[in-house]
């Protein structure tokens, strides 16, 4: 068996630069793909649910990753708009209890918008964001009841003569002397001579 050595392989300089750039570019692409930066994956709403609890109705938007959102009151106060930076399909839900009447979720631009119809304007909302899985939680409560003016019960004035007859006589005051406990003489230890 005869072996011939061709010597070191010689290639043009531009080919070496092209291969080096290709290798670096593929390494950068691999890094970005692993880090999740190479693909523009949009957040999606994966579940919308609602439940009635004592004193409130809870509305939950579960997403596949954390999403920004904004809550606004619509005109007249009988609707609440929830804009979420996450894609979704169209959905209509009836509420199981007051203060919510219905919820309509629809795609809007790059995100979604939920239109929450409430029975009375002024419904209170408590907002929470939970992490695992990512959820936007909104608790809807009835408006605060209007403060009723406190009625001052005005009793007719009681004549002094009747009040004195009905009031029990105070206990007589007896004076007792209390003697102070005996005290020990105070000795200044610094004044004592050694």
Image (cartoon, rainbow, N blue to C red):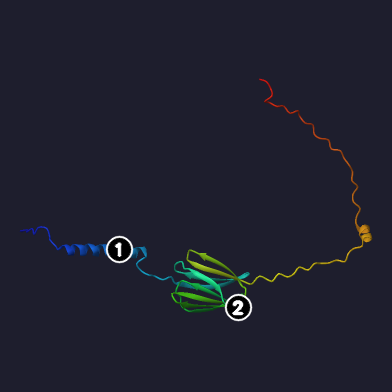
- Which residue lies at the image location 73% right of the left edge and 28% below the top edge? 186
Q: Label 1, on which residue?
A: 28
Using residue 24 as the reference point, say whether residue 38 is left or right of it. right
Under tag 2, what secondary structure? helix
User: Residue most toward the top?
Assistant: 194
Figure check: 176 above or below 70:
above
The quarter of the picture where residue 93 lies is: bottom right
Task: Indicate the position of residue 127 as horizontal and vertical percent values.
Answer: 55, 67
Q: Residues within 10 Å of mark 1 (few under 14, many from 20)?
A: few
Using residue 29 as the reference point, say whether residue 58 is left or right of it. right
- Counting residues from the N terminus, which is met first, the one under dot 1 or under dot 2? 1
> Which image quarter holds the N terminus?
bottom left
- Which residue lies at the image location 46% right of the left edge and 69% below the top edge? 63
- Which residue lies at the image location 36% right of the left edge and 63% below the top edge? 35
Figure check: 115 above or below 129:
below
Q: Label 2, on which residue?
A: 76
Disc 1 versus disc 2: nearer the observer? 2
Task: Indicate the position of residue 77 as horizontal and vertical percent values.
Answer: 60, 76
Disc 1 to disc 2, C-alpha distance: 53 Å
Q: Residues within 10 Å of mark 2 (few under 14, many from 20)?
A: few
- Which residue lies at the image location 93% right of the left edge and 61% below the top edge? 162
Under tag 1, what secondary structure? helix
């Amino acid at each position: 068996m005869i072996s011939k050595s061709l010597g070191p392989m010689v290639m043009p300089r531009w080919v070496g630069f092209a291969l080096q750039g290709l290798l670096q570019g593929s390494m950068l692409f691999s890094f970005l793909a692993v880090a999740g930066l190479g693909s523009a994956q949009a957040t999606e709403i994966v579940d919308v649910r609602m439940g009635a609890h004592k004193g409130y109705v809870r509305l939950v938007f579960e997403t596949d990753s954390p999403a920004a959102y904004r809550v606004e009151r619509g005109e007249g106060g009988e609707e609440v708009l929830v804009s979420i930076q996450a894609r979704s399909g169209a959905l209509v839900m009836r509420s199981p209890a007051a203060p919510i009447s219905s919820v309509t979720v629809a795609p809007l631009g790059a995100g979604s918008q939920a239109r929450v119809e409430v029975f009375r304007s002024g419904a209170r909302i408590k907002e929470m964001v939970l992490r695992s899985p990512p959820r936007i939680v909104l608790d809807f409560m009835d408006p605060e009841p209007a403060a009723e003016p406190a009625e001052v019960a005005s009793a007719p004035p009681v004549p002094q003569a009747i009040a004195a007859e009905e009031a029990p006589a105070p206990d007589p005051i007896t004076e007792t002397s209390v003697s102070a406990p005996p005290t020990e003489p105070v000795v200044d230890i610094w004044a004592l001579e050694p």
